[in-house]
Image (tube, rainbow, N blue to C red):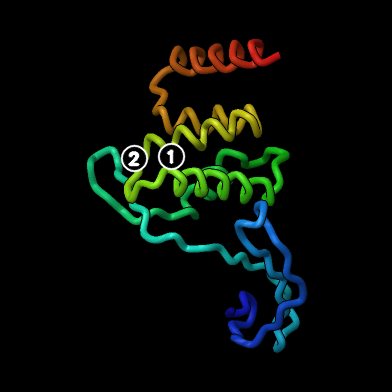
Amino acid sequence: MKCLKCNSLDSKVVDSRSADDGKSIRRRRECLVCGYRFTTYERIELGPLFVVKRDGSREKFDRDKIVHGIVRACEKRPVAMSRIEQVANEIEFELWEMSESEVETRIIGEKVMEKLRNLDDVAYVRFASVYKQFTDIDTFINELTNMLEGKRRDE
């Protein structure tokens, strides 16, 4: 594993533990050249999964795009990066459990919104406004109203 600081390939594992309910392994590493410490994750690769975009094009599934979208939605919110990683892992595993080789972006977006709704209201609204392409304030208000009604039903 290449060191992020000095690009050396010499590192040692300092700590290794199970993560995501045993679905991955978290390894804490230390560079043997500069001493920099970093974390890596090892996951089972289940085979290719393709995303069918709105325009019908296909691209290989990229978990980092989910993480990036959630990070942007959670910007300046009290949400730990470890929780964002956990949510991304949950979504990825749910997609694999569908046993399909292709999944529509709509399904991924809905799963992200579902997780964000339970994680942080502001992050949910941020993501939903981009994902659902709110075009005016009325659409935005309708989404907020639906979210609040859902929370009241859950109480």
Q: Position of residue 72 (x, y in %)?
A: 55, 43
Residue type highlighted by circle 2: Glu
Residue type highlighted by circle 1: Ile
Left or right of 111 on screen, residue 79:
right
Left or right of 132 on screen, residue 30:
right
Q: Is residue 119 above or below residue 103?
A: above
Is disc 2 surrounded by few (<14), some (14 to 19) or many (20+) residues within 10 Å? some
Query: How many numbered circles are shown?
Result: 2
Q: Secondary structure at mark 2?
A: strand
Left or right of 55 on screen, residue 39:
right
Is disc 1 surrounded by few (<14), some (14 to 19) or many (20+) residues within 10 Å? some
Q: Tag on residue 108?
A: 1
Q: Name the residue carrying label 2.
A: 104
Cα separation, mark 1 vs mark 2, equals 7 Å
Name the foreground residue: 31 vs 40. Answer: 40
Q: Residue at x 51, y 37 (%)?
A: 112
Q: Is residue 109 above or below residue 46?
A: above
Q: Residue at x 55, y 43 (%)?
A: 70
Q: Tag on residue 150?
A: none
Q: Position of residue 8 (x, y in %)?
A: 61, 86
Q: Residue at x 43, y 39 (%)?
A: 108
Q: Residue at x 39, y 53 (%)?
A: 61
Q: Position of residue 133 (x, y in %)?
A: 39, 28
Q: Secondary structure at mark 1?
A: helix
Q: Quadrant of the C terminus?
A: top right
Residues at marks 1 and 2 touching, judged by CB atoms closer than 8 Å:
yes
Q: Quadrant of the N terminus?
A: bottom right
Q: Position of residue 106 (x, y in %)?
A: 37, 35
Left or right of 70 on screen, residue 50:
left
Q: Is residue 58 above or below residue 153?
A: below
